[in-house]
Each structure stands twice: as structure tokens, then as C-alpha cells.
Amino acid sequence: MSSALRPTPHDPDERGHWGPWGGRFMPEALIAALDELAAEYDKARLDPEFVGEFQRLLRDYAGRPSLLTEAPRFAEHAGGARVLLKREDLNHTGSHKINNVLGQALLTKRMGKKRVIAETGAGQHGVATATACALMGLECVVYMGEVDTRRQALNVARMRLLGAEVIPVSTGSRTLKDAINEALRDWVTNVDTTHYLLGTAAGAHPFPLIVRDFHRVIGVEARAQVLERVGRLPDAVVACVGGGSNAIGIFHGFLDDPSVRLVGCEPGGEGVGSGRHGATLTAGTPGVLHGARSYLLQDEDGQTTEAHSISAGLDYPGVGPEHSWLKDQGRAEYRPVTDAEAMAAFRLLSRTEGIIPAIESSHALAGALELGRELGEGAVVLVNLSGRGDKDVDTAAAWFGLSENNTDNTDNADDAGASAAGRGSNERGEA
Amino acid sequence: MSRLDQLFEATRAEGRAALVGYLPAGFPTVEGSRRVLSAMLDAGCDLVEVGVPYSDPVMDGPTIQAAAEGALRNGFRLRDLFSVVETVASAGGHAVVMTYWNPVFRYGVDAFARDLASAGGLGLITPDLIPDEAEDWLAASTEHGLDRIFLVAPSSTEERIAMTAAASSGFLYAASTMGVTGARDAVSNAAPELVARVRAHTDLPVGVGLGVRSGAQAAEVAGFADAVIVGSAFVSQVARDPGDGGEAAVRALAAELAEGVRRRVAATG
Ligand SMILES: Cc1ncc(COP(=O)(O)O)c(C=O)c1O
């Protein structure tokens, strides 16, 4: 594990650029704090004490290493490929987010700051942050779009139980993007005392670098586990892409293995053609949002356009800059997965393997079904199962038309790969 | 010598600070913003900052956020910006544009500079662009003869103040408080200190913004800065008095502030 924080040839330049991407498009008022964070991380990543403490927390608190689970009944729908799941859903708090949060919370303490702010979409990052703050005695404020506070109500309750203050954001699209805006406004006002614990591998330098590094453990573990389990590298590694943290974490384990295809699944919403989606790398153009240059969903005047996804955690019009770089280099490929495809995969995994995935992760599962069919018999597909679906039961129940009085289970798992046709209701995620 | 240099030479010769007023283009409507900006200049502003409404104004407080949202809802387009600047400039007014970076980046940095210059704009204030990332803007502004106004903040190191001043022309914008835009009751005492630090590195005029809303505050800021920048207070006047598009209220405020910048108070900080 110790290698996961060490500098690599894939680090950005010292100002945070991967080629034309990344950098710092931020108010001068925040540059000192970004410099402080970058300097602290540069020291910490080489400090055995810091690295040791981070590893200890990952092991004894988060429960790492996370399991690698083969999903043979699910894989029956994947064209004869073997599907292996990297079980980030089994981490404490239920997603990959805890890795980054523990790392940044330790950095917060090193910097002597006592207050932490965060944005959250699905609530998983907010819950992880509230958890780490409880653990380390830090004050915690979480900004969350009003739409998301409704569709992820369970996580709002969890954060409050953990002692965090949750502030609903009612500007703009009232989702993740606007939660980040509000967190940035708080940060610029309180930067002396406050660390902004950003939850994805986006934003101004050094965030994309440090968030990635704290998640590199996913790929390092998974590579070793797959080698041990199947005796060779996987043919493809699949992950969902919101801001890009779980994807970049697992991709990094395989960047130097050219035979391994790296596939990011973006939220295709109601279909890229419909305009209602969040497929930034598929359909976006170069732009600047939240501090970095990257692909972006925007209109011709540079106004950010709203993303749409059934998944609160993927409902973001930007993406981390390193993904833009990997796309341009052709090292990773990105494809959209619609709400309906993701929900079908959600149901299929639940019913074939007894694992209820997060809707975010279900996008990767749908991508794995598709890739398996493309790669064919005997292929090995590794999926980052970034989180568990407990938070999504209301959204899923509404989607599938399940309720107290409607427990009709005539649909069987074999239909699940079909389409949304079997769902009993047209309701979207805001039930 | 740029037109902004001349402007500040004149106000310095008069022994006073310049008054700079901000309004987003397209607020309350495109036509309304032409009238309000003209009224601001007519009633005592030496320079206007024409804002670009943007979907994600992370440096702005509720007042300017709401104005930008309103302008966008009313269909503001970037081409309207150039036409508003042209209206102001062709009537003899001095205008710079204040914008988040993405609209410029998306439009094309050189094309934006070209179109702003041909509309008669004098320069660009870039609150989320630091000189470190501004290579293409440094080139385009030189090419098209525009001034580039970067920001410094209380948290800026000496090294960054020096670097930012060296990259700037026209004037330097000192964001006097750590925080978003919005009127405040008290002028931050960080402001005089920041201006003093800036003066150790440059002879460029220094403008102070964030929070000024009264003649008394303007006089206080004029005691240590070369320009008093007023944004949210003007926007509030328009928002409060939609009857005549806020013109009368804006004129009254501009007159009060113009009187203030001529009555500089000794710095207290
Ligand atoms: C379970 C899960 N997976 C994925 C994501 C998307 O984020 P990222 O792209 O940074 O991994 C989220 C975000 O909330 C999430 O909760």
C-alpha cells in the first residue's frame, strides 16, 4: 500500500497541468490555501509517519483491503466474460469515498485547521466526511443541493446523526455543481480556519492529484487480487465517472499495463441525444469549471448547462482534468450509460448476486455487461463497485414501481438486462 | 499610455480617488443595463465595470448572483455584452469588462479581446484568472491594446503581489476582504493594509472593492486607494426600484459616492 502515495510518472506538472488540462482557475484569495495544501501534501506523501497513519486507518477503520468478488450469475448476461467486482461498497460508510476523506482529514489536522467543509451529491462523500470529522474531532459543514437532499434523504439523516451540519443549496440546478459553488463561497470567506475537503478528483490543483492518490489504493489492491485470482491481468477495467475519483483510483493500478482497457461509464441520463444527460467526456467541450480546465457541458457562451442523471453522485456537468488527458491520449475510453441501462444492471446484480449496488456504480455494471458482450467468451472484466445501494432504495422503488401494495415480482432477473420497459412507473429520482 | 492610465492621471491630478461602478450587462434587461450604466457614468462614476452574467458565480454573494441569474433568465447572450459596452463607449464613457474566465475561454481569448477592443472597452477584470494561467490573455491583451486588471487579496504573499502587479496594467484590484461580493456595514481594516503592501511593489493605481455602499465608506476608502469600486450596492438599487429600472436610485447613489471620493478621509487602519 505504501507505494500508492509516491510520486509517479503520471503526476501533473508542478502547477497541476496534464497537458492542456487542469491548473488553477481560482480567485487569488484562495491561492495561498491551495499552495499550503500542495506543500503539505508534498511533504506528507513522503513522510512515513503520515503514510503509516493513513494505512492504519484504511485497514483498521475503513476495512481495507476491500474484497474482490467474482459475479458468475451476473456474468451470465455478459457474453461469457468473467466479471470481478472490486468491493468498495464494503468499506466503512459504504463507498470508495472514505479513502480520500481519511487522507484529507489527516492533512487537515497536519495543517492545524479545525473546520472542514464539503460538498456532496449522493451524500456518500458527505457521510464519509462527517464520519472522519467525528473520528478526528473536527467541525463539519456539508453543502448539498436541495434536489439531492430529497433523493438521498437517508444520507442527510446519517450526516446529522454524525454531528455534521447539512446546508441545503437552492441556487442554480440545486444539485452537486451548486453545492460546490456554495462550498467555495464558504471557503473563500473562512479559509484561515477551514479546509475544503473536496470529494472528487476535480477542482483546482492540487485536488485532482491528492484525491487520486488517496484512491490509488483501489487499483493497487485490485491488480494484485485479479492476478492472484485469475492468473492474469483483466482485459478491461470499468468504473463510473461523476467527477472521476473512483475511476481514476482504479485506473491508476493499470495505467502502465497497455493490454488493459480502461473504460469510464458516464451518466447518459435519458440518452445523449436527448440533451438530458451528464456525459461530459462523451458530449462536452473544453472549458473551465470549479478551478480546472477540463471537458465541460456548456453552451456556446460558456454557460454551464445542467447535467441530468438518475444518480445524484454522477449528476455533474464537469469532470476531473486527468480524465480529459487520458481521453485525449486514448489511454482511457468513456461511454455513456443511460438511466434505464443503469437501473437494469442495478436490478440484475441485486437479484443474481445478492448485492444491491449504488446507482452510480450500476452505470459501471451496465458498462461491464456491454463490454463483456463485446470482448466475448473468457474475457475478464473488472468493475469498480464504488458503493452500496442502501441510499438508493427509494429512488429504485419508484423506478421499478415497487411499493407496499405492489410487490408483484413477475419480472424475473432475466428481463433485467432488457430495458426500462418493465418498470412500472415513469417516476424519476425525486420521489 | 492607455486610456485607463489617462483616467487615473486625471483623478490623481484632482487629488481624489476614481469612482468605479459595477453592473452586470443584461440586468435588469439588456436595454435596462444600457440606461443604468449610462446613468451611473452621468451621475459621477469615472469608470464602469460591465459584468458578464455567468451560471456559476462562485465569487459573488446573493445580490450579484440573483442579478446574474435574472439576466440569464431574460436571455442574456455574450453578444449583448459587446453591444452594451459599445453603447457606453460611444457616448464617451469609460468601460472595462469584469468576467469569470470560462465565457472568455469558450469564446476564444483572442476573439474576445478583439471584439471587446472594437466595442470600445478598455480592459478586462478577471476574478478567477491568475497571471500564472493567463499566457493567452497576456498575449491577446497586448495585441489588442487592452488593459488587464488582476486581483490581489489579503492572503496574497509578497511574491504573488509583485508577480500580479507586474502582469497587470491600468490598475490593480485589491479585494479588501476575504469573502464574496456584497455590501457590508464596515470597510474591512484589512483593506488599507493590503493597499500599503501593494504600493511597496508598484506605482499602478490600486482599486478597492467588496462592500462599499455609502458616501462615508467611499470617503474612507478614498483615503488610501486610487479607486473606490462599488458593485452590489448599485445592483441593489436597481433591484429595489424596478419602476424606472432603478435609474433614479442609481443616480442618487452615484452622486453620493462621487461626493464621497472627493472627500477623502485619513486612513484609519
Ligand atoms: C458510490 C459512488 N460512486 C461514484 C460516485 C461518483 O464520484 P466519482 O466519479 O468521484 O467517483 C459517487 C459520488 O457521490 C458515489 O457515491
Image (cartoon, coloured by chain):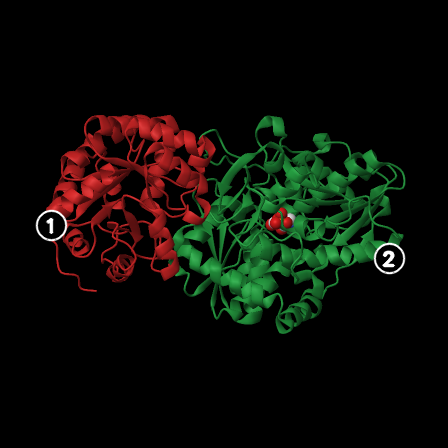
Q: Residue at x 31, y 25 (%)?
A: B83
Across and down, in percent, residue A348 comes to 77, 42
The numbered disc on residue B15 is: 1
The shade of chain B is red
Cβ of mark 1 under 8 Å from ligand 1: the answer is no
Query: Image quarter for residue A341?
Result: top right
- Taking B232 as reference, is B259 left or right? left
Give x and y (percent) for residue A343.
70, 39
Q: Chain of mark 2?
A: A
Q: Residue at x 82, y 47 (%)?
A: A234
In the image: residue B269, left or right of residue B70: left
Name the kind of residue labelled 2 in the image.
Glu
Please tell me the colour of chain A.
green
Question: What is the count of numbered marks?
Answer: 2
Residue type, mark 1 in image: Gly
- Vertically, is A44 above or below A240? below
Q: Residues within 10 Å of mark 1 (few under 14, many from 20)?
A: some
Q: Position of residue A77 (x, y in %)?
A: 83, 38
Q: Which disc is residue A228 wearing?
A: 2
Residue B134 position (above or below residue A63): above
- Inter-mark Cα distance, 2 to 1: 79 Å
| Quadrant the N terminus of chain A occupies | bottom right
Q: Is B258 or A276 nearer to us in this picture?
A: B258
Q: Residue at x 38, y 48 (%)?
A: B59
Classify the position of the C terminus of chain A by image quarter. Answer: top right
